[in-house]
């Protein structure tokens, strides 16, 4: 049995993967696509709004899911009607946390604009995973790296653990590594400058790896399969044909690992009229928000076939729920070097990194 929504999610992941070069260039593929639309009124407005994203010296992008625990529970019940009580308890705990989580990245160029800052050594940045208002923060200011985790706060927000429980579990690790307790206590940690520079260099090398095709070609595919409608002075809707987009992305580079045959198989499992629906907000001539309707993808992309295997999919498509992927853009950044921080020794950082999968 193919689980309901698996086909649609696979196709969505493929779609996002193939247009990553465009995402990297602009911050939002769907928004850039609008710059090429033929409608005379929306085109100059959206074009200017998108270009403004990288014409800044500093910017913050925040990603989150616009949904509720009840919406997520509705999806789960449609897919798994016979889940055992212990699994339901685990799912419900997760459903309460997911709507509280957001991920933001603030970036500030040392000189000029973000578009001109082509490597990590030319920018400061801060990435924050927020659970409600409780953060996990990673920050780079010049050649210094910092980390802070509000363990107690996140535990209280989620109800999943307490700071005391974490301290007990980390007791053996803290032996000989006093910084571990400071980390659990929510204090700022500082990574040695040499290690931070090394990590930044590796990340820069990876980000500078040659792409399989010109990003402009991906952009052309998105543009060719999208239409835009101006709703009001600040709101625009974008409708992108999923089949045309997937087919076009496969044709961009015949030498990549997403072949025309792969695209044909994916398209065969999509309903006619499957679209990627995006709503954009433009304020003061700048893109400030984009929202992709994931519920529509789940409910309208996969074909429903005959047989008992697709009963769960039919239930899911009949269910009422909200699930949007939201990206918000701002020119305000919070990248400030802490007044005090506990240093994590270089050897401990490297030992930790070397223990991670893929680094051994």
Image: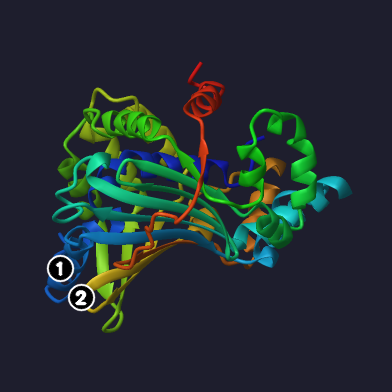
For residue 75, say whether it is visible: no
**Which residue shows up at 25% across the image and 51% down it?**
222
Q: Residue at x 75, y 55 (%)?
A: 93
Question: Can you name the residue that lies furthest to the top here?
Answer: 360
Q: Which part of the image, by quadrant, shows the N terminus?
A: top right
Residue 285: which disc? 2
Q: Is residue 93 above or below residue 39?
A: above
What color scheme is it?
A: rainbow
- Quadrant position of residue 332: bottom left
Q: Measured from the top left, where is residue 148 in percent x and y? A: 54, 50
SS of the residue at dot 2?
Answer: loop
Pick the residue in front: 211 or 322.
Answer: 211
Query: Relative to residue 208, is residue 284 depicted above or below?
Result: below
Residue at the spot 66% in from the left edge and 56% down from the top edge: 154
Residue that numbered label 1 is attached to: 48
Question: Sequence order check: which comes first, mark 1 or mark 2?
Answer: 1
324 sits left or right of 171 in the view: left
| Residues tagged 1 and 2 counted as in contact (Cβ below 8 A) | yes
What residue sits 59% from the left and 44% below the top?
Answer: 305
- Vertical relation: 17 (above or below) 52: above
């Amino acid at each position: 049995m193919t689980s309901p929504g698996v086909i649609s999610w696979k196709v969505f992941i493929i779609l996002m993967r193939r247009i990553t070069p465009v995402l990297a260039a602009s911050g939002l593929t769907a928004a850039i696509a609008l710059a090429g639309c033929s409608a005379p009124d929306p085109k100059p407005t959206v074009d200017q709004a998108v270009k403004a994203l990288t014409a800044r010296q500093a910017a913050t992008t925040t990603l989150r899911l616009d949904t509720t625990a009840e919406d997520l529970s509705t999806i789960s019940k449609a897919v798994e009607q016979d889940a055992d009580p212990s699994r339901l308890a685990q799912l419900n705990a997760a459903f309460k946390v997911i709507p509280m989580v957001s991920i933001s990245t603030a970036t500030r160029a040392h000189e000029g604009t973000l578009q001109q800052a082509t490597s990590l050594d030319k920018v400061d940045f801060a990435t924050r995973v927020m659970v409600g208002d409780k953060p996990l923060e990673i920050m780079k200011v010049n050649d210094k790296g910092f980390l802070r985790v509000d363990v107690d706060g996140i535990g209280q927000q989620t109800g999943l653990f307490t700071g005391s429980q974490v301290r007990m579990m980390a007791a053996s690790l803290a032996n000989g590594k006093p910084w571990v307790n400071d980390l659990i206590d929510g204090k700022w940690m500082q990574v040695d400058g040499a290690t931070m520079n090394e990590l930044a260099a590796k990340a820069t090398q990876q980000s500078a790896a040659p792409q399989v095709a010109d990003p402009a070609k991906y952009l052309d595919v998105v543009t060719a399969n999208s239409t835009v409608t101006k709703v009001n002075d600040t709101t625009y809707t974008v409708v992108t044909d999923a089949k045309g987009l997937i087919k076009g992305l496969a044709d961009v580079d015949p030498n990549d690992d997403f072949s025309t045959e792969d695209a044909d198989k994916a398209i065969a499992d999509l309903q006619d009229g499957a679209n990627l629906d995006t709503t954009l907000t433009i304020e003061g001539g700048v893109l400030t928000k984009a929202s992709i309707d994931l519920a529509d993808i789940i409910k309208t992309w996969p074909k429903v076939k005959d047989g008992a295997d697709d009963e769960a999919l039919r239930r899911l498509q009949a269910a009422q729920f909200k699930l949007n992927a939201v990206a918000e853009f701002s020119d305000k950044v919070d990248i400030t070097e802490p007044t005090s921080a506990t240093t994590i020794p270089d050897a401990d950082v490297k030992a930790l990194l070397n223990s991670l999968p893929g680094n051994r």
